Structure formats: C-alpha cells, structure tokens
Amino acid sequence: MKNTISKILLGTSLLFVGVSCDKKLDIEPFQEIDASNSFETDEDIQSAVVGAYSLLGSGSLYGCNLVMLPELQAGENYLNWNGTFASFREVRNKTMTAINTEATRTWRAAYQTINVANTILANIDKVKDEDLKATLEGEAYMIRGVLYFELARMYGNPIQSGENGLAVPVVLTPTTSKEDLSKNPARDNVGKVYNQAIDDLKKAITLLPEDNGTRGDVFSAMAFLSRVYLQKGDYANAYTVANAIIENGNFALSPSVTAVFRNKNTQESLFEIQQNLQNNAGTGNDGLVTFFAGLPASSSNTSVGYDSYQQVVGRRDANVNVNFYNLYSSQDKRRNELFYLGRSSRRYSGKYVDFGQNFVIMRIAEVYLIRAESAFRTGKTDIALADVNKIRVRAGLDALTNVTIDDILLERRLELAYEGLRVHDIKRLKGTTGTFTWNDTKLVYPIPQREMDTNKSLVQNDGY
C-alpha cells in the first residue's frame, strides 16, 4: 500500500494497521467450541480462528449454499436444476417451506460460525502478542460481519423496502452455557443487521494486516465492505472503498478469463476458500463442484482449462440455461472458455470443475464492477467507462466509447455469473426473475421451523 494512504473516508476515518503476522499456524482447528474448556492460550484462540474458516468453507456456507442458492433462486432464463435433491429444487421453484433443508442448514452453520467468532472476541485479550492479537481479532470481526450480511439478505426483507423490515437476531456474545441457550433473541430489523455487518468489517479493516497469507486481510475486509455498500445502495461509500482497493492493493486482472478459477490465490483474488483434494466441500456429495460440474470421464475439455478427466466429475445438477448463454457474443472469451458441453449434452459453467480447486469469493473483477457502477451513479462516468472496458478487453471484446448503466449491469451479469450474486442483484435493482418481483415473499428464506419451535420470540416471514 502506498505510504501516503493511511485512511479511507467512510463517514468515519478507518486507520490501516500496517502489521504483519509472520507466524505460520500449524494447529488443529476447533470446529465447535467446547464450553467445558476455557480458552487459556494463544494456540486455543488460533485454533478457533482456523475452525471458523473451516466452517466458512463448508457446504452450508461458501462451499456451496451462499454461492449456489442465490443463483438457483433467480434461475429463470439463467440456471436450470436437474438434480434429485428436493431441497434445492424447492429453492429453484420458489416452493420452500419452513422445513427446507438448505434454509435450515445455512442458518445453523452461520450462527455456529458466528458463535465461534464471538468466543474468539470474548477471549482475545488472552493473546499477548499485540500483532497476533490484532490479526486474530480482525479475522473474527470480518467473518462475523460477512455472515450477518449474508443472513440479512437471505432471511430478511430487502433493504430496498426500508430498514425497518425484519431480518435476523444479532447476537454478539458467545453461547457457552444452558443459561445462554435459554435466551430467546428476537429478530432485529434489516437496518440494524446491515449496520452490524458494516461496523464489524470496519473494525476488521483497522486490525488486519495488508498480507495475511491465504487468510482474510485488510483488502478482503474492504472488498466485502464494498459489496455490502453496493447491496445497500450506498454508492458513495461503495465507490470510496472499491477505489481504495484498486488504487492501493497489489491486485490485477489475470491475463485469461479462466486463470483465477484454475489457479489458487492469484493476483486477481481477494478472498477464497482454501481447498485441496483431501479436504474440500465436494467429495461428500456436497459443494459447488459436485452440483455445478458435468464433466464425463476421460474426455477432452480444453475449454475449461484441463486436457482430460480420468474420472466422472460432478452430478450435472445445475446446468446453464441456453437463453443466458446466448447473451454472450461469439467473440467473448468467457463464452468460449468458461462454458462447456458436458454430460447429458447440457452446457455447464467452467468455474467449478475440480474438487481440489479453491472457491473464489471476492476478486478484483468484481471490485472494478462495483467501482464502475458506483462511479456512474455518482457522476464519474469517465472512471465507469474505463473500469468496464478493463473487463471487456480482458474478455476479448472491443472497448466502448461511452457507457450507460445498462452496459455496466450487463457486464456485471456476464462476468460474475454463478458466483452467488444473482438474486441479490435482482433485489437491489428492483428487477424480476420470471414472474417473481424483487420484493416477492418467495425470494426471502423461511426462518427454519426448528428455530421457531425452540425460540418463541421469533416471527416467521410472510408466506411461510
């Protein structure tokens, strides 16, 4: 980062703490907090942070549901579902009930991970090394803030309907006893949950180092914050944060449209879920590759970046709708290199093809598009044009000489397809998917029935 940059104006000043953590953590993760064992050492808290990342990458969260469900839910003319899992079909068809498995497991996993983050924050003063303490605390705030944002836009009313609509309970202290479990927090309004996510991410920015290896760093937190501001329609702040990332981070678009998905932790990536062939969200009949891929055994698929496959990969459940595929021009490298004809003669996304690959959650291409849209909406059309052209030229398309908001939104739709943004963009832009308008109750997830049964303070969403 440039030495002259020490803060970003986000209504309040956010100071970047230029610390680094040289310690390489080689420890066993806690995926659940055992209330009978208090945290006593640095290693206990480090293990909990590793456990939080592990939960974040599970199929219930970014390993599948936080990415695939928003794509399925707005799948009309976009993404087909041909799988046998009824719970995913209900999401695609907007026929969920309060016992939908995906709505239930995502809620549970999110609050389990939030509880790990809360436990870390409650015990953070036990870490004596100040640099390590700041990093671990920042990671906990980032993870908690990101998950409250995801919960708000899944289970809450769209913020475009106003900030007083119900969202989810905000819980900021760890649950460690039966007495804690007996508390029945009510749902907070969507404005409060968004504000909590923003506050957590701002705190993370003040604490995280610029380089944290393969884990969340200051730029990861900033990228998520820019996404929150865009979803909220706060274009001034979305521009400020996205611009700071682009101007001060060491990020760049990969030369090819496939590179960020075929290689791990590239210069294009700001945050990704770390996986390998032994530890991933897919080989247990779950995960993005399992559902998105439809590659046959021993077939040539150079279009997705591999010479051949020696085994069947994917269940071929989620396949690309031909109407969406046809939005790409014949010259577009994304059309020619990021889609392929696979099993059952259907077309599939080439973004998820290898069980050992990392899942890219935030990348600089999205940040450019956030800045482009926010710049256009705040009168900086020259910056908007330049950013859109960066994406277009990388895709093999001619640069535009002028830009409209429709140009920007189309480029966003084509570039970020199947990366977990589809239904959220429809809501924030007040669009439609099929016959469902942006504020239809069926585009909001039900509060899981098991939560309703145990917490009588909860109120169910309309339509369930």
Image (tube, rainbow, N blue to C red):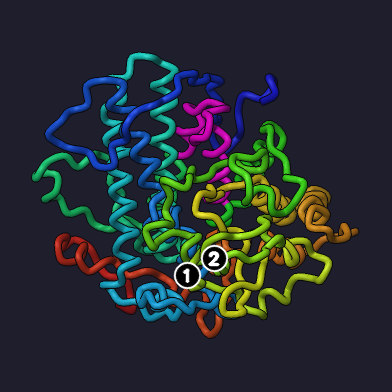
Quadrant hosting residue 388 = bottom right
Whether 217 is among the magenta residues is yes
Magenta region: which residues?
A: 201-229
Instruction: Report which quarter residue 285 is drawn in.
Output: bottom left
The residue lying toward the viewer, choosing from 326 and 348, is 348
SS class, disc 2: loop
Q: On residue 56, which mark appears?
A: none
| Callout 2 touching callout 1 (CB < 8 Å) | yes
Give the farthest residue toward the left. Answer: 178
State the residue at coordinates (35%, 74%): 87
Task: Please give the residue where the numbered disc 2 appears in the rendered image.
Answer: 293
Who's the residue at 73% across and 67% down the image? 335
Callout 2, which amino acid? Ala
Q: Quadrant of residue 345?
A: bottom right
Image-based side of 21 in relation to 447, left or right: right
Can you give x and y, in whole percent of width and height, for residue 221 in the image? 52, 39
- Earlier-in-chain disc, 2 versus 1: 2
The amino acid type of the residue labelled 1 equals Arg
